Image: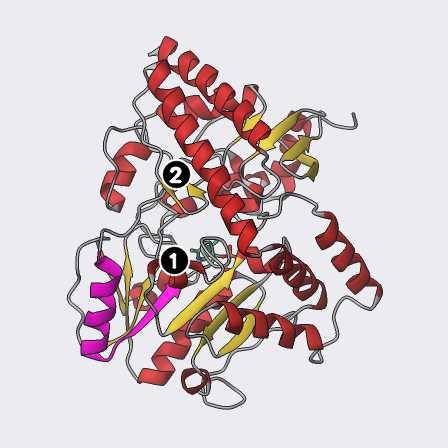
Amino acid sequence: MSQTNDQLFERAKKVIPGGVNSPVRAFGSVGGRPYFADRAEGPYLWDVEGKRYIDFVQSYGPGIGGHAHPKIIEAVREAALAGTTYGAPTEREILIAEQIVDRVPGVEMVRLTSSGTEAAMSAVRLARGATGRDKVLKFAGHYHGHSDALLAAGGSGVANQGLSGCDGVTAGAVGDTIVAPWNVMPEITDDIAVVCVEALPANMGLVPPTEGFLQDLRAACDKAGVMLLFDEVITGFRLARGGATEFFGVQPDVWCFGKVIGGGLPVGAFAASAEIMGHLAPLGGVYQAGTLSGNPLATAAGLATLELLDAGAYEQLTATATRLADGMAEAFDSAGLTAIVPRVGSLVGIFFTDTQPTNFDEAQASAENGVYPKLFHELLDRGVAWAPGAYEVLFPSLAHTDDIIDQTIEAVGQAAAAVVATQ
Ligand SMILES: *Cc1c(COP(=O)(O)O)cnc(C)c1O
């Protein structure tokens, strides 16, 4: 062993703020210090001390095929040998756009970016440019990346930091952002350009829309001539072949994608009808660009990932998630630990409360009641890695076999009993 987790964390903290390049990784909200990844394969991740974890983080979503899937690795290797970036268009950019158009009902054109943050930021600029309106409405607890205007009341890492807002974001930058509580129909006025929504919110734990909410939101947007944006950075190509759009049967005007379509490389995308996308440079006046946008390695990894995701894959993912959620709920119950394990498609959440939260305030009350950090560490000790933050969800992959799920459930039962023993 070259260096231990402790030694690496001490070294990292000297040259990287908090020792990490994305705040949640620092373990701030669960305590302790992070494990440093050495390698990963399928459902497993090994840290630098050789300890193996069944990994449900999967890089917060991209790992839908499991870590280091041979087909994705081969696609990236082959692409790299032909050059890592050109600054000229490539055929694979067309192929991935064609795939997205084919899969997601309503999408006609796609622009690739290098992150979900860029995708959401650019999609909002596009909506403002296309409508000539300024205001943006978002829901509390929904995360749309870390661009200034969308950071207000973001879930996920923002919530973990205990920040209501964010230093360095000016009043001007969020002056046109309206934040509304989730699952309550907001007033949709005709000065709003776009309503941003995680159609299935998965950054404040898993808090599904109430029955008919997305349909009502669609109707209210239509009435006021407001664009509806589905941020499908997590749900895209995961919840169903056509993402949340297909799953819920509601079509937005603008979409954001990321995570899964990058196959583990830095990618985002935004999409809309040809008419709306026509406002984008070089066709229209809304500027948007990127040195590495449509990167050859990222498109190769993305295409290889989408190739894994046929109808059978979604059936498998849903069955895996169902086995996990049901088994966990049973394990918590047996251990006498109050918990709710929501599941939608292949996404699984966890709340240590007796009722399913329906909005950010309720999710927050559950996330901050102190149970999650205890269970997190009991599980980590038993070789199961959940995200180091109570606002994240579990990402079972195609590599999580029934056997792996059953081992996980057993560990959850033991961990829950250990937590109960300390209560
Ligand atoms: C992860 C995420 C983003 C941001 O994507 P990055 O690639 O981290 O910039 C945006 N929206 C949602 C819903 C996300 O989960």
Side of 304 where 115 appears, left or right? left
Res. 363 image quadrant: top left
Residue that sits furthest to the top in the current view: 421
Q: Residues within 10 Å of mark 1 (few under 14, many from 20)?
A: some
Residue that sits furthest to the right in the current view: 81
Res. 374 image quadrant: top left
Who is closer to the viewer here, 56 or 247?
A: 247
Q: Residue 71's spot in the image, x, y percent?
A: 73, 53
Q: Is residue 126 above or below residue 385?
A: below
Disc 1 residue: CB within 8 Å of ligand 1: no
Q: Is residue 174 above or below residue 336?
A: below
The magenta-colored residue range is 212-230
Q: Amino acid at mark 1?
A: Phe
Q: Residue 321's spot in the image, x, y percent?
A: 46, 39
Q: Is 66 inside the magenta-drawn segment? A: no
Q: Are marks 1 and 2 in contact (CB under 8 Å)?
A: no
Coloring basis for residues:
secondary structure
The residue tagged 1 is 247
Q: Secondary structure at mark 1?
A: helix
Who's the residue at 61% across and 44% down the image? 16
Q: Is residue 188 above or below residue 108?
A: above
The residue tagged 2 is 349
Residue 191 visible in image:
no
